[in-house]
C-alpha cells in the first residue's frame, strides 16, 4: 500500500463518520448545489455538528455561518467544498490550515474541461499532499452514509436513501441520482453511496479497500467510465472477494473497441479494450453487468439471500406457462431443476389437488391460495436436492396475493436456502411486491429474470470457496539477455526485431522455439541446417522486405546440407531479381515441423491493464472467427488453462471427434512464461507467436515464428 | 488616472454590486472567496466596471479577474 493509499484508508473513516462538517461555499439559495447540499445535511439529521461557511451570510438555515473555515472554533472532521472551481484551491488550502483531513469537492470545472481545469485539479492534489488530506471528487454528486451512526447526506441528490447493505460507487454523478430514484421505487437500501467524479485523489480502488472492512456493506456496485489503474482495480477486487467474501459488480461503459483495427499485429487487432476489460474482470472475480437493471437484479440476490450451494432449483408456480418459460430460462442459464425424492413427491401429493403438477416445476394451479403455496414451498425447502426456490405468482380472482407474499417471507427466514419471487403483473400484485421487498425477498417482474442472479450467486459461492491461483515465477529465465537484445534493437533504431533476434528473446524465457540458426554464407547455412536436422525452412532476413514469400525469400522442405547451401544462394538470387535494392542481412534457418496443430499466442499493452496475453487457434479460427481469449499478466497456470479452454475451438485440442488429445499443458506453460516476459520487458509493445505448433499430449509444443514490436 | 483613484473607484463599484461596505474590502480580496460573489454578481461586476469607466472589456478575460488588485490592473490596461 502506498503512503497515499494508507492515508486515504484512515481519512475515509473520518469522511464517512464525521463528527463535524463544514460546508464551504454554501448559500441560502434553495435549488442550487451549494444551497441544497447544506439543506440535505440538515434534513438527514447528521450525527454530528454542521457549520456553514459563506463570506457574506451571518446565518444559513438558522445555523450560524462563518466567513472562513479557519474562523470556526470547533475542530472540523469533514469539509464539503461547493465553491466555483476558480477558488476551490483557496478553500482547500484553508481546510489544510484548519487541520481538516477529509474533504469532498463537489464543484465541476476541472479535468473534465481540460486546459485550465486540468491545472486546477493538479493544484488541488498538491495542496492535499501538503496537508495529508484526502478528497473525493472534484466534479461529483457527493457522498451518502445511511448508517444511523452517521446519517451523512453530503450530496445534492433529491432524497436520502433507505439503509441497506449495498454500497454503490459511481464515476457519474447524474447516474447516481437516477439510481437513487430507481432504488427508492424498488425499496432497495444502501450502506454507502459515493459519487467520486474525477477521482483526482481518492479512487474506486481506495473505496473498495475501505468497503472491504465496512460491516454495513455486503455487496459492492461500481459504475466506471474509465479505468486508470487496471491492475490496481483487479487486485483490490480480488482482495475484497477473497478476504471479505463481498461480491464486486461493475458496470463499465464504453463497450466499443475503437482503435483496435489500427494495431500493428494480430494480437493488437484482435484485442479490443472491452474484450480485455472482460478478461481482466473475469480474472479478478468481478461480476460484470451490462446495465443498471441487471446490476440490481444480481445485487439484491447477493445482498438479501444466502448463496446457493448448488445450481439445483425448485420452481413453484400457479400458472403452467410461466413455469415452463422459467424452466427453459433456467436450463439455458446453466441451472438444473432439482429431482424430488419420493418423500417430497408424497408430501406434495398429499398437500395439493389431484390436478396439480407435483413434479418440478410444481404447479399449484391457478386457484391456489396461501396455504397451498406454503405447503409446496415447505416441501421444496425440506427437499435435500433443492438449493433454491423460485416462487411465481399470477394474479387470479381468488389469489390472496399479500398473504402469499407474507408466507414467502416467513418461510424464507426459516431456511438457509435462497428464495426469489416473481409476482407477475403490475397493479394487482403491487402490494404483494412491496411486502416481498420489505422482507428482502428478491423480486423480479419477469420470472425468467430470476435465473441469471441465481446462477451468478451460485458461481460466486463457488469462487469464494476456492482460492485464486497465484502465478508461477520462473527462475530459469535470462532476463538480462532478453533486455540486452531488446536494447540493442532499440539502439539500432529498430521498431521491431527480426525473426532470428525475436526467437532469441523468447528463448531467453525458455519458450520452446524450434531449433534454429542464422546464416550469413552458403557454407554456414549448410552446417546450421545439418545441426538442426531435416527438414528445415529457410527465410531471408532483411529490414527492407515485408512479404518474404512474394520475393522468393522463403524456402520450405529443405532436406539436406547440400540443398541448404544451394537454397541459400537461390534466396539471394530471387530477392536480387525482385527487389534489387533490398539489403539482405542473412538467412534464418529453422526446423520445419509438419505435424501438429497451429495456435497463436500474443502480447499487447493495454492502456488500463498493462500487459495482456492472447491465445487462439491458428488459421481461420483467428482470422475469420476471432476466436481468441485474453488474460492480464501475470497469468497463473489455472488462468492459462482457462484461456485455452475458453476459446470455442478448444475442443480441437482436447480430443473432439476422435482427434488426439494435444499437449495443452505445454501451451499453458508457454503462456505463463510469455506473461513473465511481458512483465519483465515493458519495452515490448506487441508480440506475436504465430504459429506455435502443438503436438500430441506429452510431446510438447514449438514456436515456429515470432514477431516483436518495440 | 492615478492608481489610488482607480482602486478606490473599483472598490466603490464592487461594494455597490456586492452590497457590502467599501471599508471592508481589502486590496487582495477575492470576489468569490472573500466577498461571496455568485456567478450572476460576477457578470454584473463586469458590466458595472464597463459603465463606471466607459470601456468595453473582453468578457472571457474579464471573468478570469478575481481580485480587487487584479481588476485594477485589468481596467488600467483597457483604459
Image (cartoon, coloured by chain):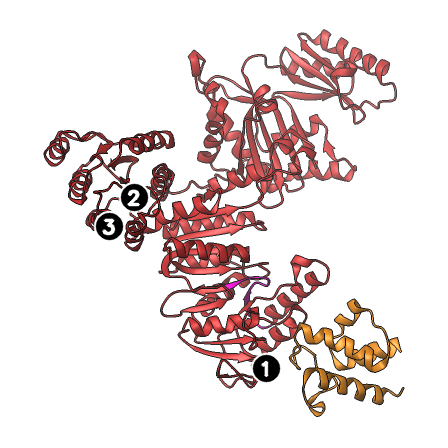
Chain colours: A red, B orange
State whether residue A102 appears in this view: no
At 65% across and 38% down in the image, what residue appears? A258
Is the Cβ of the residue at disc 2 closer than 8 Å to that at disc 1? no
Is the Cβ of the residue at disc 3 closer than 8 Å to that at disc 1? no
Q: What element carries label 2?
A: strand
Discs 2 and 1 share one subunit: yes
The stretch drawn in magenta includes residue A140: yes
- The residue pinned by badge 1 equals A68
Q: What element carries label 3?
A: helix
Q: Closer to the N terminus: mark 2 or mark 1? A: 1
> Residue A177 location, x and y as percent?
50, 58
> Residue A110 location, x and y as percent?
65, 62
Q: What element carries label 1?
A: loop
Q: Write down the region rendered in magenta.
A: A131-142
- The residue pinned by badge 2 equals A421
Q: Which of A331 and A506 is in front in this view?
A: A331
Residue A275 higher or lower than A666, as above or below: below
Q: In this view, does A262 lie to the left or right of A440?
A: right
Q: Which chain letter matches label 3? A: A
Q: Residue A402 carries which label?
A: 3
Q: In this view, does A26 lie to the left or right of A315?
A: right
Q: Distance between the residues labelled 3 and 2?
A: 13 Å
Which part of the image, by quadrant, shows the C terminus of chain A? top right
Q: Which chain letter matches label 1? A: A
The stretch drawn in magenta includes residue A84: no
Q: Closer to the N terminus: mark 3 or mark 1? A: 1
**Given this view, does label 3 or label 1 mark the residue nearer the observer?**
3
Q: Nearer the viewer, residue A592 or A41?
A: A41
Dividing the picture into quarters, in which one does residue A285 lie?
Answer: top left
Amino acid at each position: 500500500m502506498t503512503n497515499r493509499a494508507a492515508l486515504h484508508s484512515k481519512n475515509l473513516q473520518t469522511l464517512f463518520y464525521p463528527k463535524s462538517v463544514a460546508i464551504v461555499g454554501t448559500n441560502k439559495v434553495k435549488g442550487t448545489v451549494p444551497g441544497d447540499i447544506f439543506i440535505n445535511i440538515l434534513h438527514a439529521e447528521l450525527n454530528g455538528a454542521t457549520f456553514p461557511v459563506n463570506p457574506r451570510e451571518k446565518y444559513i438555515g438558522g445555523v450560524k455561518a462563518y466567513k472562513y473555515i479557519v474562523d470556526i472554533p470547533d475542530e472540523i472532521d469533514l469539509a464539503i467544498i461547493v465553491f466555483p472551481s476558480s477558488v476551490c484551491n483557496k478553500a482547500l488550502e484553508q481546510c489544510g490550515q484548519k487541520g481538516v483531513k477529509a474533504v469532498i469537492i463537489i464543484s465541476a470545472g476541472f479535468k473534465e474541461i481540460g486546459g485550465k481545469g486540468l491545472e486546477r485539479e493538479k493544484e488541488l492534489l498538491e495542496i492535499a499532499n501538503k496537508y495529508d488530506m484526502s478528497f473525493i471528487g472534484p466534479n461529483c454528486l457527493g457522498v451518502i452514509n445511511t448508517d444511523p451512526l452517521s446519517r451523512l447526506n453530503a450530496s445534492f441528490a433529491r432524497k436520502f436513501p433507505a439503509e441497506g447493505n449495498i454500497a454503490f460507487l459511481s464515476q457519474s454523478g447524474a447516474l447516481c441520482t437516477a439510481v437513487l430514484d430507481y432504488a427508492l421505487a424498488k425499496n432497495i437500501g444502501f450502506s454507502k453511496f459515493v459519487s467520486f467524479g474525477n477521482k483526482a485523489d481518492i479512487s474506486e480502488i481506495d473505496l473498495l479497500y475501505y468497503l472491504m472492512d465496512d460491516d454495513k456493506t455486503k455487496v459492492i456496485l461500481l459504475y466506471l467510465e474509465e479505468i486508470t489503474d487496471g491492475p490496481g482495480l483487479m487486485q483490490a477486487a480480488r482482495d475484497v472477494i477473497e478476504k471479505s467474501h463481498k461480491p464486486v459488480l461493475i458496470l463499465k461503459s464504453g463497450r466499443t473497441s475503437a482503435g483496435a483495427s489500427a494495431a500493428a499485429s494480430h494480437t493488437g487487432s484482435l484485442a479490443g479494450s472491452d474484450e480485455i476489460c472482460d478478461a481482466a474482470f473475469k480474472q479478478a472475480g468481478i461480476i460484470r453487468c451490462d446495465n443498471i437493471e441487471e446490476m440490481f437484479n444480481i445485487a439484491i440476490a447477493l445482498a438479501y439471500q444466502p448463496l446457493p450451494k448448488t445450481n439445483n432449483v425448485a420452481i413453484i408456480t400457479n400458472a403452467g406457462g410461466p413455469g415452463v418459460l422459467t424452466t427453459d430460462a433456467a436450463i439455458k442459464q446453466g441451472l438444473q431443476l432439482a429431482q424430488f425424492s419420493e418423500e417430497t413427491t408424497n408430501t406434495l401429493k398429499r398437500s395439493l389437488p389431484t390436478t396439480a403438477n407435483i413434479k418440478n416445476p410444481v404447479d399449484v394451479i391457478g386457484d391456489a391460495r396461501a396455504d397451498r403455496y406454503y405447503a409446496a414451498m415447505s416441501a421444496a425447502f425440506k427437499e435435500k436436492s433443492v438449493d433454491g426456490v423460485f416462487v411465481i405468482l399470477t394474479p387470479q380472482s381468488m389469489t390472496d396475493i399479500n398473504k402469499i407474499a407474507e408466507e414467502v417471507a416467513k418461510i424464507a427466514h426459516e431456511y438457509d436456502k435462497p428464495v426469489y419471487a416473481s409476482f407477475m403483473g403490475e397493479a394487482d400484485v403491487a402490494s404483494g411486491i412491496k411486502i416481498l421487498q420489505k422482507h428482502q425477498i428478491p423480486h423480479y417482474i419477469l420470472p425468467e429474470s430470476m435465473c441469471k442472479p441465481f446462477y451468478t450467486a451460485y458461481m460466486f459461492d463457488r469462487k469464494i470457496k476456492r482460492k485464486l491461483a497465484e502465478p508461477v515465477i520462473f527462475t530459469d529465465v535470462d532476463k538480462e539477455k532478453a533486455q540486452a537484445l531488446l536494447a540493442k534493437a532499440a539502439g539500432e533504431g529498430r521498431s521491431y526485431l527480426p525473426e532470428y533476434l525475436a526467437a532469441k528473446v523468447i528463448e531467453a524465457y525458455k519458450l520452446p522455439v524450434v531449433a534454429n540458426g542464422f546464416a550469413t554464407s552458403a557454407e554456414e547455412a549448410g552446417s546450421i541446417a545439418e545441426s538442426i536436422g531435416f527438414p528445415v525452412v529457410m527465410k531471408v532476413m532483411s529490414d527492407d522486405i515485408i512479404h518474404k514469400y512474394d520475393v522468393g525469400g522463403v524456402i520450405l522442405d529443405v532436406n539436406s546440407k547440400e540443398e541448404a547451401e544451394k537454397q541459400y544462394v537461390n534466396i539471394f538470387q530471387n530477392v536480387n531479381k525482385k527487389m534489387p535494392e533490398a539489403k539482405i542481412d542473412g538467412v534464418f534457418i529453422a526446423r520445419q515441423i509438419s505435424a501438429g496443430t497451429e495456435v497463436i499466442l500474443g502480447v499487447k499493452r493495454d492502456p488500463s491493464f498493462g500487459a495482456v496475453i492472447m491465445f487462439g487457434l491458428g488459421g481461420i479460427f483467428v482470422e475469420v472467427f476471432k476466436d481468441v481469449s485474453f488474460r492480464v499478466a501475470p497469468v497463473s497456470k489455472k488462468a492459462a488453462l482457462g484461456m485455452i479452454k475458453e476459446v470455442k475451438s478448444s475442443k480441437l485440442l482436447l480430443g473432439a471427434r476422435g482427434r488426439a488429445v494435444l499437449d495443452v499443458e505445454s501451451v499453458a506453460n508457454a503462456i505463463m512464461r510469455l506473461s513473465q516476459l511481458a512483465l519483465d520487458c515493458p519495452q515490448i509493445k506487441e508480440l506475436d507467436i504465430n504459429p506455435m505448433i502443438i503436438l500430441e499430449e506429452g510431446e510438447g509444443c514449438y514456436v515456429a515464428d515470432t514477431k516483436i514490436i518495440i | 488616472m492615478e492608481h489610488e483613484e482607480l482602486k478606490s473607484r473599483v472598490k466603490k463599484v464592487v461594494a455597490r454590486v456586492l452590497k457590502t461596505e467599501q471599508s471592508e474590502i481589502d486590496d487582495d480580496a477575492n470576489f468569490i472567496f472573500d466577498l461571496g460573489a455568485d456567478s450572476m454578481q460576477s457578470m454584473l461586476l463586469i458590466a458595472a466596471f464597463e459603465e463606471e469607466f466607459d470601456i468595453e472589456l473582453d468578457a472571457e478575460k474579464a471573468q478570469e479577474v478575481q481580485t480587487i488588485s487584479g481588476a485594477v490592473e485589468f481596467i488600467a490596461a483597457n483604459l
